[in-house]
Image (cartoon, helix red, strand yellow):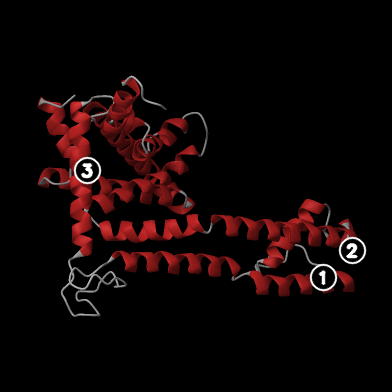
Amino acid sequence: MALTGKRKWLNEVIFGTDTPLGKGFDVFLIWAILISVLLVLLVSVQSIAGRYGELFFVLEWFFTALFTVEYLARIYCAVDRRRYIFSFYGIVDLLAILPSYLALLVTGASYLLVIRLLRVLRIFRILKLVRYLRDANLLLRSLWQARRRILVFYASVLVVCIIFGSLMFVVEGPKHGFTSIPKSVYWTIVTLTTVGFGDITPQTVLGQGIASLTMLIGYSIIAVPTGIVTAELASELGRERLSIRCDNCSRAGHDKDAEYCKHCGYKLEDVEREAEKKEERAAEKKAERKARRPGRTFAEEESRRQSDRPGDDE
């Protein structure tokens, strides 16, 4: 159902970024989030909290009331209320105000208000920093493609930690701080990652030899995950270069910021700008379809129509 009247105007201000009022609202909201998070950080400093505790308390509830009203206003003017409530930003908006109310029952829960920083992610949408989001998606795709190899690597490291932890438990024993196998595994992980807290140290010659071997293994495998992700990142970058094709000679392999074809010298199209325009057009079409079909997406409508046709197979 299309919005009308006050709901439409409020939707353009709160969810929109194309109008000066909408962009001003989002910038004001980001400043309010940053200030409220700064207050949470300052409250944790005892000397500052003891001096300005009452002021911080008043400001904290002021921002909580502000974000509560804003959250309710978002629900009120949202085109699809259910979709907003269960979306990523909808859940973050709710979590941004819950700790203050939870603090009335649980002491210290107000420190969880730092989760409001997640709301600053809207700055990418507000300032239209699409290219930064695209680079972030590139990194996420690389991590996702490497997930199996990373999982195998960490499973192997876990096996090594359990074996060496058990050895240290047998060799050193409780009298040297290795009171159980889990605690010995903890020591192995700390040693293998070259952190070395020093809270538990081997005292016997054999234990020190095992510790030395653990450290050497740590140095040899610590760069493995980086190499896995780097390889996938290089593959993703290669695929992106292949997607940029010259309209004159039809040859690919250009960098994202290339202005001219490296083979024939023909001026390339602004790929980034064209991608942004396509995304904007797709978002507009999606909004129009949802306005025409309330509560049901275009894909769901098409799927329902096809399933209703007689003689169609699933």
User: Looking at the picture, which amino acid does disc 3 mark?
Assistant: Ala
User: Looking at the picture, which amino acid does disc 2 mark?
Assistant: Val
Q: Position of residue 136 (x, y in %)?
A: 37, 58
Q: Which mark is residue 283?
A: 3
Residue for badge 2: 171
Q: Is residue 126 visible?
A: yes
Quarter of the figure that contains the N terminus: top left
Q: Which mark is residue 210?
A: 1
Q: Which mark is residue 225?
A: none
Crowdedness near tag 3: few (<14), some (14–19) or many (≥20) residues, C-alpha within 10 Å: few
Residue located 37% across and 49% down the image:
117
Q: How far apart are the alpha carbons under marks 1 and 3?
A: 59 Å
Crowdedness near tag 2: few (<14), some (14–19) or many (≥20) residues, C-alpha within 10 Å: some
Q: Position of residue 309 (x, y in %)?
A: 31, 21
| Tag 2 and tag 1, C-beta contact below 8 Å | yes
User: Looking at the picture, which amino acid does disc 1 mark?
Assistant: Ile
Give the secondary structure at mark 2.
helix
Residue situated in front as seen by the camera: 296 or 68? 296
Q: Position of residue 150 (x, y in %)?
A: 58, 59
Residue situated in front as seen by the camera: 271 or 217? 271
Q: Is residue 70 left or right of residue 211?
A: left
